[in-house]
Amino acid sequence: MAAARKVTLPKEVWELAGLFGEGQPLYLIGGAVRDILLGRQPVDFDFASAATPSQVKALVRRWADNVWTIGEEFGTIALLKNNVKYEITTFRGETYREGSRKPDVTFSDSLKEDLSRRDFTVNAVAYSLSEKIFIDPFKGAQDIKRRVLRTPGPVEQSFRDDPLRMLRAITFHATLGLKLSPEVFNGIVEHGNLLAQVSTERIADELVKILLAPRPSDALRLALRTGLSDYFLPELARLDIEQPVDYHHKNVLEHTLQVVDNAAPILELRLACLLHDIAKPDTREVVDGEIHFFRHELVGARMARRIMRRLKFSNELTDKVVELVKLHLRPHFYRDEVWTDSAVRRYIRDAGEVLPLLNQLVTADCTTLNPKIAAAAVEKQRDLERRIEEVLEKEDLMAMRPLLDGHQVMEAFGIEPGPMVGEILKGLLSAQIDGDLATEDEAWEMARAIYEDETGG
């Protein structure tokens, strides 16, 4: 047991604790206790008790505003009180059977046994709400002070019980700045292949936490050094290749990691930063002694879609990331003397809703150490953004539609729905954006020209 100290908690926590008797007291556990020991105010409250789920339900039903039993099979009852969510879990242990992606859950009547099953000692500290003392059988408070990650029991057993703990170690390094003990580091190197037993959704959740951390690059490097990234993002290690020094002072991998750090912690933006050059290893060519990555943005967009789908991200998020990867080079070709107003309008229209994020990606993508090149790149991007603002003040490009609709085109040319209709409408809209088309008569003239060109008639 650790020495008692003053702990400030919401009154609802004390009220909830008062519902449990002396025989089955309530303990605050997990991240809330860790935050208290780190000197932070906890915002998420998880509890443990020897009480069974049915007993917990009976105790809290009248007090709580709402009760959920979706996690009852795993020993967890969730409840809402004054718009704050609390979770109470019966003392338990979790283990993965070899080849299974679902843990086996067993209940226990021992707090120490429950804590021994926690991922790391920093999370294996409980706070007794009845005695107002910390219970710390595995010296987690000491590890929090040292800012180091250790497992309560043997590393191999811990990672076999739940292989996601290896990736969670990387997450804690990213979000809390905790170092991996040598045993944990070596355990990940040796048992990283066990991550294949964990569901893709759980892995993706951890990747999101890493990417939204203040400085994701350190954690991503750690995932690379341990080899763990090979089991959820194998494409990352392949980025460790050279690229031209004229604009980038690093290899592709180091450039990518810095771009991620440069970006604001917006999920679709940081994912796009992580994947924006993902196709460079596959598109690398040496021409006359110079390294090129021709069309890597288009190949990268296809790769990004496969990766996002493999990690089971939503279609909406995937579409945004893919569009950002596909367009990330467009602004690099901006020059005031060659980008006409219609070119700016086309860029705005093509980017659509990801335009603000695309501008941020382009800014983050500048990692050169050459101050003149960096200053020129920043000024060029600012100039483009000024021109975008000017165009948007004058025109609502997002609301622009072709002067003819698909039904009119199909009826006029006697064609069925299909690519031909799309090509005609796309051509009309493109001409409108360029300012070359203003009336319906002009639209019909162009539609006929496109139709005859496509059909040869």
Image (tube, rainbow, N blue to C red):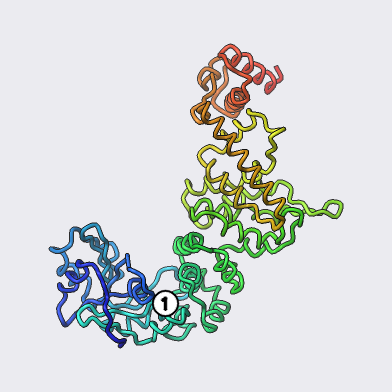
Q: Amino acid at mark 1?
A: Asp
- 340 to the left or right of 403: right
Residue in the picture at 38% in, 78% down = 118
Q: Percent x, y for residue 421?
A: 58, 25
Residue in the picture at 59% in, 68% down = 221
Residue in the picture at 28% in, 81% down = 5
Residue in the picture at 48% in, 53% down = 266
Q: Identify the image quadrant of residue 65.
A: bottom left
> Quick one: label 1, few (<14), some, or many (20+) residues within 10 Å?
many
Q: Is residue 454 above or below residue 4?
A: above
Q: Quadrant of the N terminus?
A: bottom left
Asked which secondary structure carries label 1, the reply is: loop
Q: Quadrant of the C terminus?
A: top right
Q: Percent x, y for residue 68?
A: 24, 61
Q: Which residue is mark 1?
A: 119
- 299 to the left or right of 81: right
